[in-house]
Image (cartoon, rainbow, N blue to C red):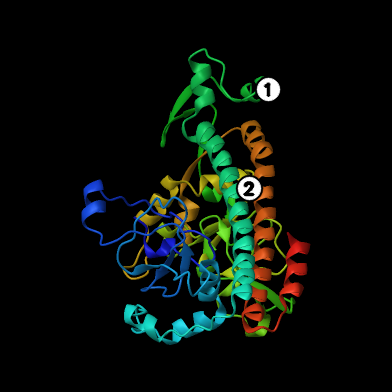
């Protein structure tokens, strides 16, 4: 069962950030209806107006605070309706119809008041297919990135959580999935530590021993005239969704953490939301909110640091140490004091050698997806309003795709 935070205007289909399930009996008897492929999943409370497509097959159900909209195909082309609801014009209309201040709410009865301008069928077909085509390309890049990250996390878990190569050697077996040269770097026995059994010769260290937190902060002497700013709301698990450019004089007061290649950023606020990302290939003036802790590796590769501090175990560690009821937050010293297992330099370097290309490829795909999203979102209002001809848009799309 998906929650409202699974539906975002940045994704084609709902994402499964948290796993919640209902029984077969509840699924068949409690819900009045279920989404069908091609329906639009529309959030009505919390972040009203966020909308995604229902995939084929639909492998989820929806509960309160969202609805499934089914287009009347006699009047409107479903992909066009999807694009129209995501357009800045309609999103602004929806925002102006919110009720409630603390938790915004779009009343279901107000759908009758949400007027839409529907063009002739040829325009609907082009705009809908244009929007869907680029969105599917972005979704494909996202799935490739998910696969690459899953592969890298699989190696991390095998080597540094389950200790598979060490266990194999301890039992007189050849480690699976690695060559002989790599296997030679792993010990063949364990030792006791404050974190339990770990490979012989490896150590337990505080993060402060292997990384520097909040190393670079903008001060009065910072001469850069413009910054690219990332706030907490712009960061999803493992990804920076967007950023905003400001002149330094007009930037938010929290725009103070200057980051560099290889840094990991982690939101101190509500760590259970997993607002973290690895910074690769940033602009020289990329700045993040002081609501983040920035971790710069000093004695281990950035890949090992990133995966170490983004495991479910580490998220639980941070969540259990967050202070405050309304906005639970973690102090930077909690990061500094966290104990982690540090392998030998040879094993760390081998891991970096394997995973660094994957992480760089993920970053390149994220940049391509961002470019496509900007093209899509910039052209959409011009197409809907008729300010751009279909033939002009076709040339731009073909040039990019």
From the top left corner, tell me how far across and down residue 55 is, in percent: 47, 55
Q: Earlier in the sequence, mark 1 or mark 2?
A: 1
* The N terminus - image quarter: bottom left
Q: Is residue 47 left or right of residue 288?
A: left
Residue at image position (41%, 45%) is 313
Which residue is disc 2 drawn over?
Answer: 302
Q: Is residue 210 left or right of residue 109?
A: right
From the top left corner, tell me how far across and down residue 367 is, in percent: 68, 60
The quadrant where residue 395 appears? bottom right
204 relative to 363, above or below: above
Which residue is disc 1 drawn over?
Answer: 181
Residue at image position (46%, 68%) is 51
Q: Could you tell me which secondary element the residue under label 2 belongs to?
A: helix
Q: Is residue 399 left or right of residue 266?
A: right
**Residue with the most extreme front position:** 74
Q: Nearer the viewer, residue 274 or 371?
A: 371
Q: Nearer the viewer, residue 101 or 287?
A: 101
Q: Residues within 10 Å of mark 1 (few under 14, many from 20)?
A: few
């Amino acid at each position: 069962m998906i929650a409202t935070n699974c539906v975002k205007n940045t994704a084609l289909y709902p994402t499964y950030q948290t796993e919640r399930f209902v029984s077969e009996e509840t699924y068949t008897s409690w819900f009045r209806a279920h989404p069908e492929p091609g329906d639009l999943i529309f959030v009505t409370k919390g972040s009203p107006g966020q909308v995604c497509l229902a995939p084929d097959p639909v492998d989820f159900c929806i509960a309160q605070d969202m609805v499934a909209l089914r287009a009347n195909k006699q009047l409107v082309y479903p992909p066009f309706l999807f694009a129209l609801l995501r357009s800045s014009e309609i999103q602004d209309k929806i925002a102006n119809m919110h009720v409630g201040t603390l938790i915004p709410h779009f009343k279901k009865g107000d759908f009758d008041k949400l007027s839409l301008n529907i063009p002739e069928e040829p325009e609907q077909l082009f705009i809908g297919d244009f929007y869907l085509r680029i969105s599917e390309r972005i979704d494909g890049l996202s799935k490739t990135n998910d696969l690459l990250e899953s592969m890298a996390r699989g190696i991390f878990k095998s080597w540094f959580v389950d200790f598979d190569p060490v266990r194999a050697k301890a039992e007189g077996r050849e480690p699976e999935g690695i060559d002989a040269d790599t296997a030679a770097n792993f010990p063949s026995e364990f030792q006791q530590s404050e974190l339990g059994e770990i490979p012989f010769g490896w150590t337990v260290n505080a993060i402060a021993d292997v990384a520097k937190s909040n190393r670079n902060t903008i001060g009065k002497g910072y001469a850069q005239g413009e910054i690219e700013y990332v706030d907490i709301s712009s960061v999803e698990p493992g990804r920076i969704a967007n950023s905003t450019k400001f002149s330094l004089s007009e930037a938010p007061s929290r725009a103070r953490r200057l980051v560099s290649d290889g840094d990991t950023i982690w939101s101190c606020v509500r760590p259970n939301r997993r607002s973290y990302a690895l910074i690769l290939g940033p602009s020289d003036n990329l700045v993040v909110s002081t609501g983040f802790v920035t971790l710069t590796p000093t004695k281990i590769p950035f890949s090992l640091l990133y995966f170490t501090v983004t495991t479910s175990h580490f998220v639980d560690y941070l969540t259990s140490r967050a202070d405050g009821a309304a906005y639970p937050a973690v102090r930077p010293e909690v990061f500094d004091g966290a104990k982690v297992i540090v392998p030998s330099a040879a094993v760390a370097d081998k891991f970096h050698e394997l995973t660094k290309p994957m992480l760089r490829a993920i970053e390149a795909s994220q940049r391509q997806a961002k470019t496509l999203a900007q093209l899509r979102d910039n052209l959409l209002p011009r197409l809907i309003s008729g300010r751009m001809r279909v033939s002009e848009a076709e040339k731009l799309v073909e040039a990019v795709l």
